[in-house]
Image (tube, rainbow, N blue to C red):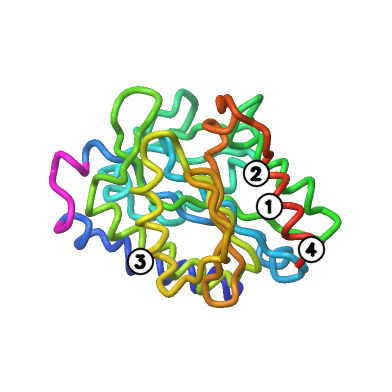
Amino acid sequence: MGHIENELDKLYSNIFNKDELRKNFSTNEISKISAPFLLKIDEEKYLNSKTKILFIGKETNKWWGKLKHFIEFDNSIEIMKQRYKAEFEGGAVIASDGIGGGVDGVKKYKAKNWGSNAFFSKYRYIQEKTKDLDSYVVWTELLKCDSGDKGSSRNSNHIQSIVELSIQTLKQEIDILKPDFIIFVTATSKNTKEYDDIIKRVCDGYVTDNNSIIKGKYWKFKYQNIQCYRTLHPLSYQFSKNKSIDFYKKIIQDIKQI
């Protein structure tokens, strides 16, 4: 196990301590909200890349199982890491319900099974357009659990226990990964301010680039020595009526000028 993975494991073991989770979340919340979104990266490739980029969404929209399943499994952190890895490489992961629709209580995933998904289309776009910079683009989330609500959106920005846990986690993930750039894709028609408020707490001491703000669509700022951007969530961008400015292209152009 390398330094980054070891540090992430220590972070996750501390933040997602099961006794603390039981204390900080109600029984109803534990049964409803999603299992946490934890990273598993290729450490050697990441460290050897010249341009390290975090691509950060709002929160998941279903992820493995519920928080109660995470608490119930002894090796749940390892399972969450396997689930993350399976998103990109495919493979079998222990199913949260012990059934998984397959044999031996596992669920099989296809690598990058994203089709025309708007979020991953933009993730791929960032990867493709920064290849010449020898980049490694890490997908992570601002909020580490989703609400578990029914419907197409599982926003958890209103659940304070998730917000507090997520701020601690992401802040330390950034400290461990030490990226060169962070791209927050969290702006939507309804909740931009709420997510921005969380970003501001994660990036405490941030400095906004003068005259960079295009209200609700683009925000450029520095956090420590990291160049950061916040723009439209890919789905919001896809359905935006005014596309006179391609904000993803604008971010890539800016990255290439630095």
Which quadrant of the figure has residue 97? top left
Element at label 4: helix
| Disc on the earlier residue, 2 or 3 | 3
- Going 17% across and 57% down the picture, which residue do you hit? 24
Residue 1 in sight from this viewpoint: no
Residue kind at label 3, given as amino acid type = Gln
Q: Which mark is residue 247?
A: 2
| Alpha-carbon span between mark 3 and mark 4 | 32 Å
Residue 214 percent coordinates (x, y) = 54, 48
The residue indicated by pointer 1 is 251
Of callouts 4 and 1, which one flags the residue occurring earlier in the amino acid sequence?
1
Helix, strand or loop at mark 2:
helix
Magenta region includes residue 164:
no
Q: Earlier in the sequence, mark 3 or mark 1?
A: 3
Amino acid type of disc 4?
Gln
Q: Which of the two discs, 3 and 4, sits closer to the camera? A: 4
Please tell me whether the stretch drawn in magenta is mainly helix, strand or loop.
helix
Asked if disc 1 and disc 2 are in contact, CB closer than 8 Å, the reply is: yes
The residue carrying mark 4 is 257
Residue 138 seen in render:
yes
Q: Are marks 3 and 1 in contact (CB under 8 Å)?
A: no
Q: Position of residue 14 (x, y in %)?
A: 33, 69
Q: Which mark is residue 168?
A: 3
Within-10-Å neighbours for mark 3: few <14, some 14–19, many 20+: some
